[in-house]
Amino acid sequence: MKRLVERAVHLSGNNDKPHSDLHEMGHNMNASLMYSTFFTPERYDSMLPIRSDLEQVERIISRELISRHKEFTDILDHVSQYKGKRLRPALLLATAHASGLVNESHWVLGAAVELIHTASLVHDDVLDSAHMRRHLPAVHTLWGTKSAVLLGDCLFTNAFQMTSNLENTRACKVIGRSAHRICEGELLQNFHTGDINISEATYFDIIDGKTAEMISASCELGAAYAGASEAVIESMASFGRNLGMAFQIADDVLDLVGHENQTGKSLGTDFDQKKLTLPLIWLLQNGPDLEKNKIKSLLEKDSSAQRVQIKNLLSDSGAIDYAKNKAEQFIAAGKRDLQALAPSAFRNILHDITDQILNRSC
């Protein structure tokens, strides 16, 4: 593991405990996958073996997004509507079932990893100046940057407190490590903003931290708290990391060539923020000099016409295909990791999720 960058996640200016005064929520919550466009109706059927567990996770998330402070009601209600793929809880639960026995700790862990993911999205939208998240306004566009940052911190610390209540301390160590790696990845990306000489190795280091680490942690915790052997736990952590790398590459391709009405979030933010991702990195390193110079010139401009030109250059040059091929390599490695599991319906779920990564449009 590379050197970690420490980050303080705390509330500023008061002694509120975002977790301690929560109470049960009376709303009926369906399994989160029902709200996702990543899992189509056909794919949702394949998730049925873990549906009841996902409903338990959803109830915990709903409970955690209630505070005794009435001032927080609207902002917490808003972020509770960020019902996306719930990929991390689904992976954690499917891995748990495929590795051993599921228990209540898995429900808590599923909620914790999703809260951390949500926190990172709230912060990402601030960093990227993104205006839309999952077909809804980004938090900072409604409540301002300060409230968005503090809300993200609340969600982070809430997840830490949840895991600290579990008897086994492994979750605290894994979640703490992963939170550090997320921040490290984001900070590294920030230092390389606008860097037209960024290497593939640095790009992979960035996405390993900001995305793959938490997906790896989800799979690791699913196996560990199911009583799996250390060999299986290690294989599942590797599976999650490979899956996460492929997922982020696919996400970066979507940011360049996707459509906002399908993804439900602001696109082109990486490009607008001068964050170079794999297709652009490859083209700048391997394309003809004429195309390299054109890309560099276009990066200095800021217009929709410029985006179209770059999109065409990426498609025509083979840069998009190159990135997709890299994602396929990570997917293949992840499938090899799954061989550590005995055949089961739950291993099939993991295979199914893996296959969906390369075909996603959101």
Image: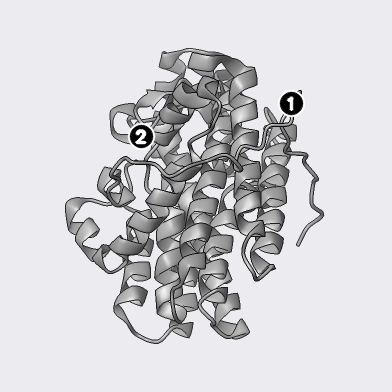
- Identified at 60% across, 21% down, the residue is 147
Residue 51 in the image: x percent, y percent?
29, 61
Q: Name which residue type carries label 1.
A: Asn
Q: What residue would you read off at disc 2?
A: 258
- Up the image or down, 69 lies above or below 6; here it is above
Q: Name which residue type carries label 2.
A: Gly
- Up the image or down, 107 lies above or below 102; here it is above
Q: Is the N terminus in the top left, top right, bottom left or bottom right quadrant?
A: bottom right
Q: What residue would you read off at disc 1?
A: 14
Note whether residue 58 is visible: yes
In this view of the protein, which residue sits in the foreground, 185 or 300? 185
Residue 348 lies left or right of residue 155; in this view the side is: left
- Identified at 42% across, 43% down, the residue is 62
Residue 240 in the image: x percent, y percent?
52, 64
Q: Secondary structure at mark 1?
A: loop
- Identified at 61% across, 44% down, the residue is 158
Q: Secondary structure at mark 2?
A: loop
Neighbourhood count class around disc 2 (C-alpha, 10 Å): few under 14, some 14–19, many 20 upward: some
Q: Is the C terminus in the top left, top right, bottom left or bottom right quadrant?
A: top left
Identify the mark nearer the N-term, 1 or 2: 1
Residue 330 lies left or right of residue 285; in this view the side is: left
In this view of the protein, which residue sits in the foreground, 296 or 258? 258
Note whether residue 204 is visible: no
Residue 99 in the image: x percent, y percent?
46, 80
Residue 218 in the image: x percent, y percent?
53, 61
Q: Closer to the camera: disc 1 or disc 2?
A: 1
